[in-house]
Image (cartoon, grey):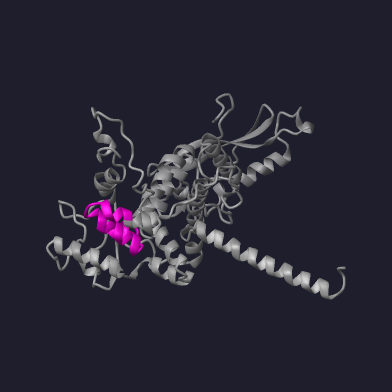
Amino acid sequence: MADPTVPSPSLPSQPTIDSKCHVTRPRKQKGYVFRKGNSWFLRYWDSVVENGKLIRKQRCKNLAPVEDAHRRLKRPPDQVIELAEAFLQPLNSASYDSAKNLTLGDFAKNVWLSQLRNRVSASTIDSTEYYWNHILVPRCGSALLRDFSTPAAQALLNEIGRQNPSMRKATLHKLKSLLSSIFKLAIQQGYMPKGSANPIRETSLPRAPEGEETYAYSLEEVLDMLAVIPEPSRTVIAIAAFAGLRRSEIQGLVWESYNGETLKVVRSVWEGIAGEPKSKYSKGAVPVIAALRNILDQFRLRAGNPPAGIMFPAGNGSPLRMNNLLNDQILPVLNACKSCGEPEGDHTGADHKYQRNGSRPEWHGFHAFRRGLATNLHDLGVDDKTIQAILRHGNVAVTQRCYIKTLPQQSIAAMQKLDTLVGSMCNQRATATKGSGLIN
C-alpha cells in the first residue's frame, strides 16, 4: 500500500503512435526510493490487466532493510538504488508487454482453465475448479502473477495448512500441483519475466495428517448388494464391480458399446456434460464375465431390448446421474432399519428407534468397486500388468499403489511363509554349526 506522506514519482507516459504510425515507447521510469521505519521502499507505476482492461496503478515495493551503517542516512545508499534499478529493469525493457501483466486470478480464469478444459475430463475440471475457486482464489487471486515468489507461495501453503488443521496431506499436494501447473503455463506463454523459475517448485508441504486408507469392496459385499438393491442401481453396481468402470464411464454407456462379450468405453458423462474418458488409456474394451452378462441381458430385456441408445436413461432421455441413484435407491436400502426395513429418514413418528441393519454392507463410494475388482483379481493370482489393462491405467504403479489392497488373510499367509523360511534357515545353520564341531 502506498504511503500518502511520500511524494509520488512522475507518471510514465503511455505508449503512443505518431502521425507516421511509429510506436513511441514511454520514457523509462526511475521510481522513488524512500525510507520508512527500518526499510527502504520503492514507489513506481505499473500497467495491470484487471477484468480485461489495462489500467495504470501506483505500487510500492519493499526493497531491503536499513543496515546499521545507514541508519543516519535520509537518502538511499548506492546498493539500494541498484536494487531499485534491477527491479524496474523488466518494466523499462522494450520487450515488456504490459498486456500480459495479469493477476493470478485473471490468468487462471481466462488462460489456464480455458486450456485445461481441452485436455482433461469433465470430472477433473469439476474438482479443479472447486479447489481453485473455494481455497486458492480468496487467498492469492489478487496477487500479481509476475511478482509471485517462492516465499509467497510457501507462506500461502503454510497459511492454508494452519487454517485447516484437518486438511489431508494429499489435498495440500493437490493445491501445490495446481499452482505449479498455473505458473508452468505462465512461463511457457511469456507471462512471467524472462528466465523466471517456477515459484512453486521449491516449496514444501506443511505438516498435515495422512489420508485415510481407501476402501475396496470384497466379493461378498458386492454379492450382498446385488441381492437387495433394485434396478437400475443393481446393474450399475454390477458393471462397477465386475468390469471396473468409473461412475462417469457408466453414465456414458450406450447399448452400442455392449456386444455380449465386452463393454467398450468411448466416452464419459459428468454432471450432465459428455466428454472424453479420463485419459487415452481409459478408452478400450473391457471383458464381460458371465455373471455380468446375465445381469446386463436381463436388464436389457426389461428395458424393451433396445438396440441402441443410452444404457441408463433418465425420464428426460439424458443419462441418469449416479448421485440420484445413490440417494434414491442405494443408500435407502443399505441403511434400512433392522426392525422395519425402512430408511432412517422415514422414521419420524415411528414406534421404535432406528437401528441400522448391520447385515448389509456399508457404502464406501463407487470407486471402491474399482479397487475391489483389482484386489479380488490380485487375490486370485492375476498379475499386476493384466489388472492394469483391465482397469485401463496408464501406469502399473498406479494400479499397485492405489487400487490393489492387501487382504488380511494375505498378510497372515505372507508372514507364515516368512516364518517358514526363517525356521528353515535357522535349522540349516544349526545343522552346519554342529557339523563343524563348534557346538559341544
State which quadrant residue 259 falls in: bottom left
Verify whether residue 425 appears in magenta: no
Residue 251 percent across, percent down from the top left: 27, 57
In magenta, the rendered stretch is 224-250
Residue 114 makes an appearance in the image: no
- Direction top: furthest residue: 5
**Quarter of the image containing the N terminus?**
top right
Q: Is residue 230 magenta?
A: yes
Q: Could you say which quadrant of the image residue 72 lies in?
A: top right
Whether 347 is drawn above or below 386: the answer is: above
Q: Position of residue 155 (x, y in %)?
A: 58, 40
Q: Position of residue 319 (x, y in %)?
A: 22, 55
Which is nearer the eye, 432 or 326? 432
Residue 343 coordinates in the image, percent (x, y): 27, 39
Please say if 393 is above or below 369: below
Q: Residue drawn at (75%, 34%), measured in percent from left and top?
A: 67
Q: Main secondary structure of the magenta part?
A: helix
Residue extending farthest bottom: 435
| Residue 257 placement, left or right of 430 | left
